[in-house]
Image: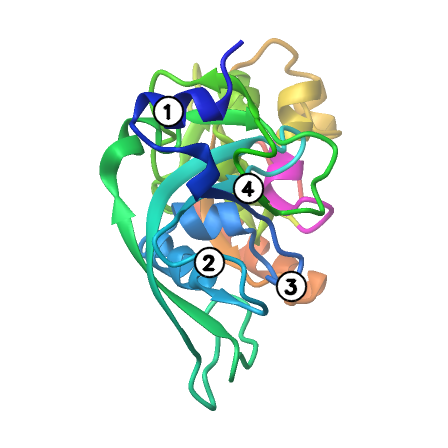
Amino acid sequence: MITFNDVLRSAGLDPATVHLARLQDSRVRGHSIYTIWKSPGGPQLVEEYLSVQGRDRFEVGGFVASFVVTPPPRNETVFTGLYEVRSVTTCEQGSIEAITDIDVSGLYRYEMAHDDRLDEYKERLVVDWGPGTRSWAQRASRQPKLVRAIREQPEPPFPGFGQFCIDLHDLPGIYPGWQERLREVKGIYVLVDKKTGQQYVGSAKGEDSLWGRFSDYARTGHGGNIELKHRQGAEYQVGVLQVVDLSLPDHSIEEIESWWKHKLMSREHGLNRN
């Protein structure tokens, strides 16, 4: 198998001049570095996050190869970009890091410039980081990483909750970043019988939010709903009607769910029985 160092050398880069940075931060609340990277404007935020460090990690004139970690259960380490370190200064007093919302006054700030020599591998190349995941910054020459995969194409951006819809049987294969977005919010959803057009409106309030509820339907075909249990073999498309904040109480979500049932008349002409 090839290593990431082989990839570096093929692009004319000496692994001794390259640091590897695996970005995964528990201080980021409600999101992951990966989903921030996939959001509009996210790459710039992640680059800014990488450029601020608590100690002097990177050499001026060297390079940093950035990786982000996909959500569970895959937890893949995906290449996201190569940067040349141009200079180093310190953050001004009162500086706040945009992703973690932490005061970074006096910390090291690196001016980094994007290097396009590895752009063909962005969001496609996956490495095996090895057991030392707590050591998130390593010198490439000392830690050759096996290349686990080079995908045919990168993951497309999440279409947005209003545009998201998918056949239930296709759900297990959706992109990791999309799964993470569906975990981030509670909400109201609709199942549509693809043959009859009948609708079932429900709410996602439990563990893993919308993703958890959709996965339950994909696994069982009915999600524990009595009416849907009588319709084994039916094929459904699922979509999101409305998203709500994770802090919204369950009773408020149920009120919104009831309003959607009324609006779509899913009790009278659909599959809801309450």
Judged from the image, the secondary structure of the residue bearing numbered disc 4 is: strand
Mark 4 lies on residue:
139
Q: What residue type is disc 2 on? A: Leu
Q: Which mark is residue 27?
A: 3
Asked whether 238 or 91 is in front, the reply is 91
Q: What residue type is disc 4 on? A: Arg
Mark 1 lies on residue:
9
- Which circle's residue, 4 or 3, is located before the other in the chain? 3
- Label 2 to label 1, Cα distance in Å? 23 Å
Location of residue 258 (image quadrant): bottom right
Q: Is residue 70 above or below residue 258?
A: above
Mark 2 lies on residue:
50
Q: Nearer the viewer, mark 4 or mark 3?
A: 4
Q: Would you call the spot at circle 4 few (<14 residues within 10 Å), some (14-19), or many (20 or more)?
A: some
Q: Nearer the viewer, mark 4 or mark 2?
A: 4
In this picture, which residue range is highlighted in magenta? 205-214
